[in-house]
Image (cartoon, rainbow, N blue to C red):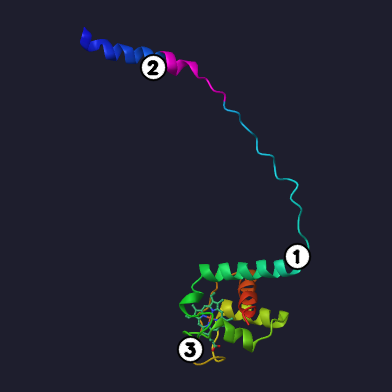
Amino acid sequence: MRFLAPVVLCAVVLASCGGGSSEKQTEKKEEAASETPVDNSMVSPGAAEAAASKGAALIEQKDCKTCHKVDTKLVGPGYKEVAQKYEATEANIEMLADKVISGGSGHWGEVAMTPHADLSKDDAKEMVKYILSLK
Ligand code: HEC
């Protein structure tokens, strides 16, 4: 019996201490950060940046990088070279977007760019806008 005493004691202690503490957790609700003001001062550059990064993201998703790099010629010209050759006018963006979709050759050498028929015109334009922003 003496052997069991510590065990019983433990049980008693646990029962008396464990049950008593019912702490209420005070839940603080995070104040909704609705008062954050919209900063309109950067709308134009911000929008241009957003458009450029959309094009960059599209280029990431496609096979473009197997043939193009930003700085150096790979199979196709580097994007910066392309940007230097063409001004970012609406007409050039249209023309280059069509090129990306239907493929092309003869402007940079003998190697042709494969067509990307699955691209929408809008996506192709976003990509070209990004490329031409890389001066
Ligand atoms: C199979 C390799 C290859 C792939 C993949 C490729 N390109 Fe090209 N790209 C080329 C070559 C080669 C040229 C140069 C064509 C020429 O001489 O007219 C070129 C040219 C271009 C040009 C300039 C066109 C001109 O007329 O000056 C743009 C813009 C371009 N590519 C964008 C892209 C984009 C965006 C993608 C992805 C959707 C892509 N390329 C995928 C090989 C490729």
Q: Element under label 2?
A: helix
In percent of the image, x 52 and y 69: which residue is there? 60
Q: As shown in the figure, which amino acid type bears the numbered disc 3?
A: Val
> Does the magenta portion include 19?
yes
Q: In the rendering, at what x and y percent does residue 18 appear? A: 43, 18
Q: As shown in the figure, which amino acid type bears the numbered disc 1?
A: Val
Say which of marks 1 and 3 sits in front: 1
For label 3, count other residues whose C-alpha is less than 10 Å away and answer few (under 14), some (14-19) or many (20+).
few
Q: CA distance from mark 1 to mark 2?
A: 64 Å
Q: Give whichever of discs 3 and 2 has the lower sequence position.
A: 2
Q: Are marks 1 and 2 in contact (CB under 8 Å)?
A: no
Q: Give whichever of discs 1 and 2 has the lower sequence position.
A: 2
Say which of marks 3 and 2 sits in front: 2
For label 2, count other residues whose C-alpha is less than 10 Å away and answer few (under 14), some (14-19) or many (20+).
few
Q: Is residue 119 left or right of residue 95?
A: left
In percent of the image, x 51 and y 92: which residue is there? 109
- Say if disc 3 is inside 8 Å of ligand 1: yes
Q: Which quadrant does the N terminus fall into?
A: top left
Q: Residue 14 — which label? A: 2
In percent of the image, x 67 and y 69: which residue is there? 49
Q: CA distance from mark 3 to mark 2?
A: 81 Å
Q: Please name whichever residue, 122 or 40, is drawn nearer the observer in this view of the structure.
A: 40
Q: Give whichever of discs 1 and 3 has the lower sequence position.
A: 1
Which stretch appears magenta?
A: 16-24
Q: Which residue is mark 1?
A: 43
Q: Which quadrant does the C terminus fall into?
A: bottom right
